[in-house]
Image (tube, rainbow, N blue to C red):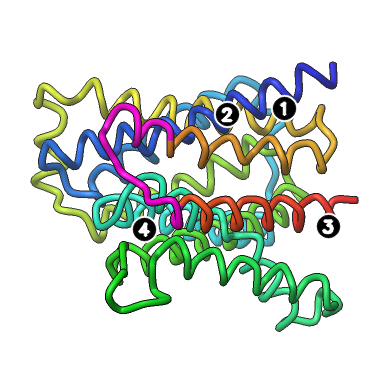
Amino acid sequence: MRFAGVGLVMLAAVCWGISGGIGDILMNKGWDPIVISFYRGAVAFICFLAWFLIRFKQNWTFSARLYIWSLLAGVGVAGNFTFYFLSIQASSIAVAATLMYTAPVFVLLISFLLRLERSTWFKWGCIFGVLLGIILLTGSYSTDSISVSFLGATAGLAAGLSYALFIFGFKNASSIGNPPTTLTIAFFSFCLILFLFMDTEEAANVVTSSDIGWFLLLGIVGAGLSFILYVIGIRRTAPTTASMVAMVEPVTASLFGVLLLGDHLTSIQVIGMTIILLTVTVLSVKKAD
């Protein structure tokens, strides 16, 4: 049973990694990142709604706190999807995926500010390790060797901060209601938020375009199916194991970009990426113990 859980978490991480590549393909076809993000979340919302309705009586929960935390999770996932694709557009899939996985560091800093967690030298060491990795990955140690644009780096870090917000909201909401309920409310709010910012005319054109299959694939693989697999798998997996397995996502995204889309990474960028992923993994594992 435990190995089945690990397999589901790993499969979900692979799906998330592939979603970055699908998003990059759609952006190369001229589609706006916000429209791409909207369809990724909208298709996922339909999947979660069906999951919620299958066991409506067990999933239905009336709680103001549940709605508030789920709404916060929806804001987080809306920012995460959008900034992730903006970062891919301005840099590369590998850079965007790696910067997004700085989320645990943001969670740690927020916990420090809210006094939810005690400050230690180990935790600050992890924070500085991630900062070092970011400097190497983006090339910001020298103005002559900057390899990632300011927009690409900023959007990638914003995706990580948004991911942290989603984790914070989802964790608190799930302690009140079931995951199907939380995800349904979160992605409903996601759709409302992005609807206000996207180009509605372009979004309408998606339905009749030849790329509709890519959008449906992105929504199912990149959010709907993957989140369900992850939620089921995480219940059967130790937190420490899940933290390590989740790192399959940036690795999958990087391989997709390098092997299939022709992205290029320098040796220093690879070192920076490795430092970030190893540091975040160690931090996540240590917190889970």
Query: Mark 4: which secondary structure?
Result: helix
Residue 138 picture location, percent across and down: 39, 65
Going from N to C along the chain, the mark reached first, 2 or 1, is 2
Give the CA separation, mark 3 to mark 4.
27 Å
Q: Are marks 4 and 2 in contact (CB under 8 Å)?
A: no
Give the CA separation, mark 2 to mark 3.
22 Å
Residue 37 versus residue 139 in the image, above or below: above
Image quadrant occupied by the N terminus: top right
Query: Mark 2: which secondary structure?
Result: helix
Q: Residue at x 78, y 71 (%)?
A: 123
Residue 68 picture location, percent across and down: 60, 62
Query: Mark 1: which secondary structure?
Result: helix
Who is closer to the viewer here, 137 or 13? 137
Going from N to C along the chain, the mark reached first, 2 or 3, is 2
Residue assigned mark 4: 83
User: Image check: 269 left or right of 4?
Assistant: left
Residue assigned mark 3: 287
Residue assigned mark 2: 12
Residue 55 picture location, percent across and down: 66, 23
Q: Are marks 2 and 1 in contact (CB under 8 Å)?
A: yes
Q: Amino acid at mark 3?
A: Lys
